[in-house]
Image (tube, rainbow, N blue to C red):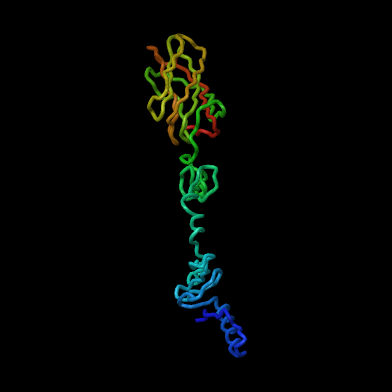
């Protein structure tokens, strides 16, 4: 142990041998950072102490009433304690959006998601991870100019596409009826009606354009147009649907089913 030191190393009554012994003792204490299994008995503010029991280097605080741990030699790492610990406390964890702080991993609005979502941590981009669509006329996501017909007297699917993401879509299509009766059409999702029934005028073979915003779509859903003719005559008097278009306010593309 080299931690005891002598404040008064010189006195007119001291012999040279005594003075030099005290100087040597003080240097030994300084060189070892006042190492010892117990704290020095006469500490002062700013004094180092290498605690050989805990294997920790400590520093005497300014008030000279406590030792503050600085370095853990057993694990070769600094010790974060006291006010430093408060700097990393709960008040700075996951602060409000736009505020700097320490963010935990997760998918919350105030968290730092793995890989910083919406880009997934595994590097993949799948339809389920895309932001939901918003209905609007900003982006034309799907445009099918094909003319579809049906001679059915009940609703049947005449066209369908696969939704690459969920949300709301603005769906438009043109409709006209048979030469001697009415034509009807409606938006369906996965075989179930979700749109308003649209009807042509009687014996009206001029296309009319219909538009409707439909929400509640999920990635992989079938966006379908069903139609039928209200006519007792057989083939040769079909209902017509064309120019199926899907719009959103954010750009992406549908895949034809």
Examine the rendered structure and indicate whether residue 169 appears above or below residue 203.
Answer: below
Q: Is residue 11 left or right of residue 81?
A: right
Q: Is residue 46 left or right of residue 74?
A: right
Examine the rendered structure and indicate whether residue 129 appears above or below residue 32.
Answer: above
Query: Relative to the observer, which residue lies in front, 66 or 211?
Result: 66
The x and y percentages for residue 139 are: 56, 29
The residue at the point 58 percent across, 87 percent down is 21
Examine the rendered structure and indicate whether residue 249 appears above or below residue 197.
Answer: below
Query: Relative to the observer, which residue lies in front, 157 or 17?
Result: 17
- Give the residue at the far front of this rendering: 13
The residue at the point 44 percent across, 27 percent down is 224
The x and y percentages for residue 245 are: 52, 25
The residue at the point 51 percent across, 24 percent down is 244
Number of residue marks: 0
The x and y percentages for residue 84 are: 51, 58
Query: Relative to the observer, which residue lies in front, 243 or 103?
Result: 103
The x and y percentages for residue 48 are: 54, 72
């Amino acid at each position: 142990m080299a931690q005891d030191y002598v404040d008064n190393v010189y006195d007119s009554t001291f012999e040279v041998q005594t003075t030099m012994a005290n100087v040597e003792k003080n240097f030994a204490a300084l060189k070892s950072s006042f190492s010892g299994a117990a704290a020095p008995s006469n500490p002062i503010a700013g004094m180092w102490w290498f605690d050989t029991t805990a294997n920790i280097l400590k520093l005497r605080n300014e008030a000279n009433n406590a030792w503050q741990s600085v370095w853990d030699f057993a694990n070769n790492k600094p010790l974060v304690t006291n006010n430093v610990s408060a700097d990393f406390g709960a008040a700075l964890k996951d602060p409000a959006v736009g505020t700097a702080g320490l963010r935990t991993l997760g998918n919350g609005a105030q968290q730092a998601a793995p890989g910083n979502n919406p880009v997934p941590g595994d590097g993949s981009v799948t339809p389920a991870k895309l932001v939901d669509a918003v209905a609007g006329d900003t982006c034309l996501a799907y445009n099918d100019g094909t003319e579809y017909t049906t001679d059915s007297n009940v609703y049947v699917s005449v066209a369908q596409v696969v939704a690459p993401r969920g949300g709301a879509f603005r769906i438009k299509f043109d409709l006209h009826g048979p030469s001697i009766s009415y034509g009807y059409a409606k938006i369906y999702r996965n075989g179930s009606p979700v749109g308003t029934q649209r009807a042509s005028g009687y014996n009206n073979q001029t296309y009319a354009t219909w538009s409707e915003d439909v929400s509640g779509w999920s990635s992989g859903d079938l966006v379908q147009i069903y139609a039928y003719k209200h006519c007792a005559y057989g083939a040769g008097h079909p209902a017509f649907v064309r120019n199926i278009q899907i719009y959103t306010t954010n750009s992406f593309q549908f895949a034809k089913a």
